[in-house]
Amino acid sequence: MFERLDAAKPALKKLIAALRERYAYASVLATDERFRSWRVSKNGITISSEGDGGYGFVIRVFDNTGCAEYSINTFSEEMIPAIVKEMETRLEAERAALPEGITPMPTAIPSDSPAVLRKEAKYEIDPMELGDEAILDRIQSIREKGMQAENVMDIFCNMTYCAERKLFLSAHRDLDETHMWTTAGVGAIGSRGEEVKESYQGYSLLGGAELLRDVENDVGHVTAALNDLLGSEPMIPGEYECVCDPSVTGMIVHEAFGHGVEMDMFVKDRAQAKQFIGEYVASPLVTMHDGAAVDECATWAFDDEGTLTGDTVIIDKGVLKTGMCDALSAMRLGVQPTGNGRRESYERKAYTRMTNTYFEGGDATKEEMIASIKYGFLLEEPTSGMEDPKNWGIQCMVNIAREIKDGKLTGRVFSPIVLTGYVPDLLKSVTMMGGPFKLEGGGYCGKGYKEWVKVSDGGAYMKARIRLG
């Protein structure tokens, strides 16, 4: 798989050597991607191979006055002299862009400690070997099963697969990883009288088409949730004791807090978290992680700047310890990069981006949390969220709120739900954590409504006091 990167590698090493004759640091990121998605609904069948990554190369150099990047989608040894000249031109343009009389500030050189890594993707069933016909047969079967449920107007079922290989080469680093993720989703649209509602469940794993087993076993959950929604009531605004399921916990960790600790925002003074390092921002029950300590769609052994990834503990028992950062932000802030420099593709810049972001679990069970509530709600099916790193506000949407009264679910369902408030107030109100732990990686995350990268988020069940509307 991806043999053309093997063919390019010897010449890429020669390019690094040629650039190092002129620059203190030089690196190349090489990527190659296979992507395919399938979808069935009453509107028909759709198959797409429009991925984001593609085949290409990012060349980066640093000297003591600046850095420059250049991306290309073809490479050969004969191009090396032209690429060296292009890097000189780009650095000169960076200097020329400075106002007259301004001397370039010294630029730190990235760490290039020796590292060699080889990692192959693990999977049971390669979707490309399984083939379009077999995949469409299986997701069509899932759709037909869902269509048998009461009040269903349509079921749409989709699966998306991505396999990608990345090489990162510098004077002292030779990193090579092949990565495969698969996601799927089932959505149910139904009506009862004048009421029309939709329920959706996503699925993901670091692997292949074996994911379809989970989808096939779970379609009944989606149609049951749809029928609950068809009998739902509008929410009465107020502040309530709530139990968040792992998907809602994940939305809170990602939207409410994750974006606020992306440290490129620290460089620009656009994140309030910068002022709270070392302080309590959450209950002592809350510990937050980002990184490669778990296996999900966003798990890579190194980032797009050649930084080895690991486990970044952002909140430790309520105390904000650090953020996550790319290499350039780390140099400007005087900290170590955390392996969060990520690109939408070889044609895009690297930004600080989340990977697998989650809250740790605890000792409580879901049942204990529900039993502890006099009046409140069990929150399920997050649909969207919006971050506000500058002011630490939260505004997220949830599809289902199940009423809890005297420690028991009553069967009443409210929808739709808006979660609002000040993030530290919400996190400091956490009184119980635990139950099943789960991450979901079905979506992408944008940086300012663009620069989309694959992420996952989640955690366990969480009890907190939340303002609902």
Image: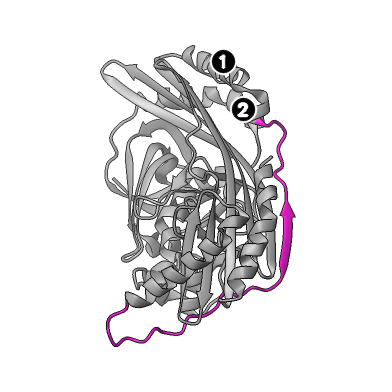
Comparing 328 with 62, the one in front is 62
State the predominant SS element of the stretch in magenta.
Answer: loop
**Image position of 98 with respect to 45: above or below:** below
- Left or right: residue 178 versus residue 422 is right
Instruction: Give the amino acid type for the residue marked by disc 2 in the picture.
Output: Leu
Query: Would you say residue 278 sits in the magenta stretch?
Result: no
Residue at figure coordinates x 40%, y 64% from the top left: 424
Residue under pointer 1: 141
Give the image location of residue 174, x and y in percent.
69, 62
Give the image location of residue 154, x and y in percent.
41, 17
Crowd band around label 1 with a 10 angstrom C-alpha radius: few (<14), some (14–19), many (20+): some
Q: Which residues are magenta?
A: 98-126
Comparing 174 with 39, the one in front is 174
Q: Which mark is residue 212?
A: 2
Tag 1 secondary structure: helix
- Left or right: residue 395 versus residue 178 is left
- Left or right: residue 121 versus residue 63 is right
Q: Quadrant of the N terminus?
A: top right
